[in-house]
Amino acid sequence: MSFLFRIPVLLLSLLLTFTSAQSSNNASAVYVYDGSDSTQFVFAINIDKSTGDLYFHLSSPAGNSWVGVGIGEEMKNAAMFIAYPAANGHDVTISPRMGSGHTEPTYDSNIKIDKLSGNGLTGANTIDGNDPGSTGNIVADGVCRGCAKMGSGTIEASTTQPFIFAVGPVFPRMASDSLSADLSRHMLYGQFTMDTTAALSDSGGAVPLGPYQNKDASAATGTTMDNDPAPRIHGIVMSVVFILAFPLGAVLLRVWNKVKAHIAIQVIGLVLFCMAFAGGSVVSMQYNRSKHFNSAHQVIGILLLIALFAQLGLGAYNHSIYKRTQQKTIFGKIHTYLGPISMLVGIINGYLGFRLAGAQMLAIPYSILVLVFAVIFLCIRGVSHFRRRKKAEKAEGYQYPMFGGPPAGGPPGAPPPYAQQDVPLQRFESSQSLPRMDSPAVQPRTMV
């Protein structure tokens, strides 16, 4: 009897659970952004009114390195959910972060996110096709505990609750289990609003199920394709400075003895370096990995800035002394060695810059450029040295070659001529007079 009584109770419980789940899934707001390439960005929410838990579904083309949504009108003080491929390339990492302005958002351990699966969710927290240009999707399903009351605004009964969204670039690729993994700057971002009154559940909550169509959400506004050229400009200008400009200035002086051209090229190179240094400093402030200026690339860059200004001062001071005295100084020797060392360190620092930017794949074309220009400048120096040597040998010449005479320098082992010994020629005067050899007087013959 008791068993028969329990069956209706069990069925009623299952029915209530199913009804509650259906109610939670029906209470939802869905935002869908259709891309120009038939791809979709989807963000769907359901809010447990009693706890403030925010259940969400987030999906985007898998070809992008990451995808994210933030609560609020702008990045500053916005609670964000950032999803990107896990280390195995198949699962998804969901990183809770807090925005602080137009910079990379920072991982916030106070924001609790739990991944969810089952209950009708298909492909939850997985990636379908993690390749550039892939038509698959990165899918993140989870719940943010108490997130309805966190960030720059609280998600209450608002018909126009603001949100922001963004997707990362195709390159560099991401694959990390770390919740504080480095992010590249977004390639697309925008804003939208949702009617959260349609997403509120009185009790319990669940991730909204598909298929997903725009529901109780506005169209995207302020959608912008972001193509920040500053990092590329920084890298290109620095490469021109250390691979082309500074070596060219050195060759102009050492090979062709063009002092004014040497000064002009080196000053231009220093100006370009300062411009690229300033641009790199601005870019560094946008990322967590570089905003403290303590990476090897940045420290070496600061030291190079000091060294190059010292190089300019040493060269100018040595040149002014040489013009007055025609003598070399210790400042000139330091200038001679500091220049090549700075160029070499600057070229090596380029590789560290690629690593800091997460663009290690650029090291190969960079190495090719370094090798090509190194060969060119070394060939110029080599040919110049060979020609000078031949010219010097030809200048020595021969004495009377048509008569088979000895070389102008004399036979091997002969002392150098007076002109090379700086021995002045003097008039010879003897302190003793030579005896006079007078002939005897002619005596006349006697006449017989």
Image (cartoon, grey):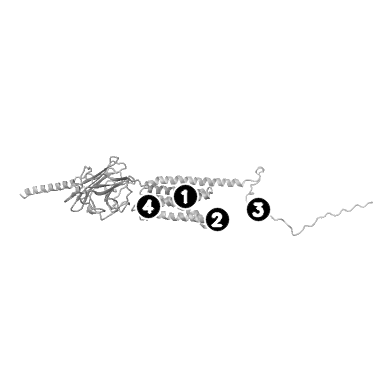
Labels 3 and 1: the sequence-earlier one: 1
Mark 1 and mark 4: Cα distance apart in space: 22 Å
In the displayed structure image, the side of residue 298 where residue 137 appears, left or right: left
Front disc: 4 or 3: 4
> The residue under label 2 is which amino acid type?
Tyr
Residue 127, given in percent of the width and then of the height, sits at 27, 45
Pick whichever of labels 1 and 4 is earlier in the sequence.
1
User: Would you say 154 lies left or right of 253 here?
Assistant: left
Residue indicated by mark 2: 322
- Dot 2, how many residues are within 10 Å of its Cα: few (below 14), some (14-19), or many (20+)? few
In whole angstroms, how far apart are the C-alphas of marks 1 and 2? 23 Å
Disc 1 and disc 4 in contact, CB within 8 angstroms: no
- In the picture of the structure, the residue carrying the numbered disc 4 is 282
Q: Earlier in the sequence, mark 3 or mark 2?
A: 2
Residue found at x 14% / y 46%:
19
Q: CA distance from mark 2 to mark 4?
A: 41 Å
Please report contact status of discs 3 and 1: CB closer than 8 Å, yes or no. no
| Camera-nearest label, 1 or 2 | 1
* Residue at mark 1: 268
Residue type, numbered disc 1: Ile
Image marks 1 and 2: residues in contact by CB distance under 8 Å? no
Q: In the structure shown, which secondary structural element does the residue marked by tag 4 occupy? A: helix
Frontmost residue, 269 versus 140? 269
Left or right of 409 on screen, residue 35: left
Residue 67 seen in this snapshot: no
Point out the frontmost of discs 2 and 4: 4
Residue visible at 48% across and 53% down in the picture = 339
Point out the frontmost of discs 3 and 2.
Answer: 2
**x 48%, y 48%: residue:** 248
- Gap in Å between the C-alphas at discs 4 and 3? 68 Å
